[in-house]
Amino acid sequence: MMNKRLIITFLIFAVISARAQQKIIQLYPGAAPGSQSWTWDEKRLDSNLWHTPVVYNVTHPSLTVFTPDPSNNAGTAVIVCPGGGFQALSIKSEGTDVAQWLAKKGLTAFVLKYRLMHSLTDDPTMEQKTKPAKQTKEDARKVIPLGIADTRQAIAYVRKHALEYGISPSRIVIVGFSAGGTMAASSAYKYTAENKPDYVAPIYAYMPQELQSTIAADAPPMFLVAASDDQFALGPHSVDLYNKWIASKHSAELHLYARGGHGFGMRKQNIPTDNWIDRFGDWLNLEGLLKPIDPKVTAAMEKAKLLESQQDWQNLRRYAAANSQVPPPAPNEKRVVFLGNSITDSWINADSSFFSGKPYYDRGISGQTSPQMLVRFRQDVINLKPAVVLILAGINDIAENTGPSKLEDVFGNIVSMAQLAQTAHIKVVLSSVLPSNHFPWRPSIIPTEKVIQLNRMIKDYADKNGIVYLDYYSAMVDNEKGLPKSLSADGVHPNLAGYKIMEPLAEKAIGEALKRKN
């Protein structure tokens, strides 16, 4: 049993790791309800008509977390919904730039990627410009309910996991821009206790009458911003919301600028709209959301967090609901479970087409080490009755995410998982650790040689025991024994190009495993 000091140490490591890796959370464990047939891949375009990076073809909604310095944590969460006409997401100007500003203020920001129209080209900004208005309206009509569902799911996730991030479950703000403003404003209607936002901030939002309904008696305070010269004439939408909120005796604040156009976000135009974010900060401060939670409440939250970590250190809750819905394998079904850490966890977001239409189950959990995977092996692997399991573990152990560990112990955990699988008549694929020569979240540790040594141990065991060894390392390593920039943004986690190298290797290994007798 872990003692209290070890548990607290683990929590500190987990917080540092989550902050540095910019944790990405999948809102649904598999395909999002209502879009199970979508097979296109999420992509990013930095150079475009909007002159700001965009993300498009989102099929697997997610939250990217930006946490404040722990010493400056106000205990308030802000969900950020970028806009983009339901065709794309202005991910920087209306997403990450906003989140970084909020984190500096002591707020925990979650950038939401919600489902969008399917872009048929590689330039969604041009596609939006040239698409007939009638078609745009029809496409938007179909996708808006899905985006709203994603928004409600995001609020529910943040409230459910409030303790994990040191935030109050009653201090959840949602801010959205343009189409993202539709998401934010819609969340202020027809909510439940689980997905109700505590504060709402639609910024130059699109919010027509058909998306509105009765304003509840406990509707959240609202902060609105727009420009009178908005190219899409959306200023009146903000005025309409403001008037209705005030008429229904609810708190509201409106800033309507003479100039600014549409989509100004965090861009600098050297006009008053440049300072809208400061006015937003003033409003947050007026509502008491920049002031740290009462110390007594904080102490109670920390105690609850400690208790929660003791009870679910291995994070069995993550896939519990999803696992309960997995049916028994169909006749001749060759089900495959991918077990791992953030590299596995992010795979389905980076390339959803790899998993679509196949009996593949992603069971990765960001930040996890091999002992955590070993403890949840029965729930997240054996009970799903797969034909094959791909085990990818070890890099977070080397990074000491849950404290120092010997390579022999890490290797032993991987062997134990393989043995459990074989006992359950599951074919095993043991994956190499991906190359890495540094950790952005743990710069004092140089992992290069430990990665090589652990891979050698895994390969030797696999060869001696007739198990398939999946060698990602050799296919991806550069001349500095790390992941090249073309395959990874941080030297640890693969990008889409990296996953495209991994995928045929994984499928070949699965095929080889299915042919083996043991």
Image (cartoon, rainbow, N blue to C red):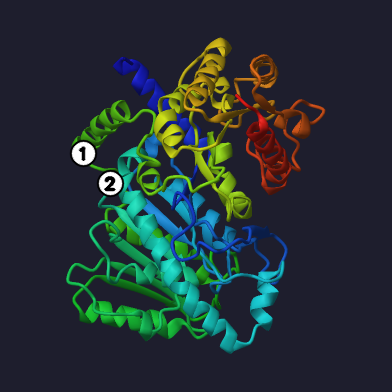
Residue type beneath disc 2: Ser
The image quarter containing residue 220 is: bottom left
Q: Position of residue 401 (x, y in %)?
A: 49, 25
Above or below, 286 against 468 in this view is: below
Of 464 and 93, the residue lying toward us: 464
Q: Residues within 10 Å of mark 2 (few under 14, many from 20)?
A: many
Query: In the rendered image, is residue 230 in sight?
Result: no
Disc 1 on helix, strand or loop? helix
Residue for badge 2: 168
The image quarter containing residue 129 is: bottom right
Residue 297: mark in rendering: 1
The image quarter containing residue 210 is: bottom left
Residue placed at 21% from the left, 34% from the top? 300
Disc 2 on helix, strand or loop? loop
Q: How crowded is mark 1: few (under 14 residues within 10 Å), some or many (20 or more)?
A: few
Q: Position of residue 292 (x, y in %)?
A: 29, 43
> Answer yes or no: do the residues labelled 1 and 2 have beta carbons within 8 Å?
yes
Residue placed at 51% from the left, 71% from the top? 272
Is 57 left, or right, of 66 in this rendering? right
Residue type beneath disc 1: Val
Q: If the image is split into quadrants, where does the N terminus sit? A: top left
Query: In the rendered image, is residue 153 in sight?
Result: yes
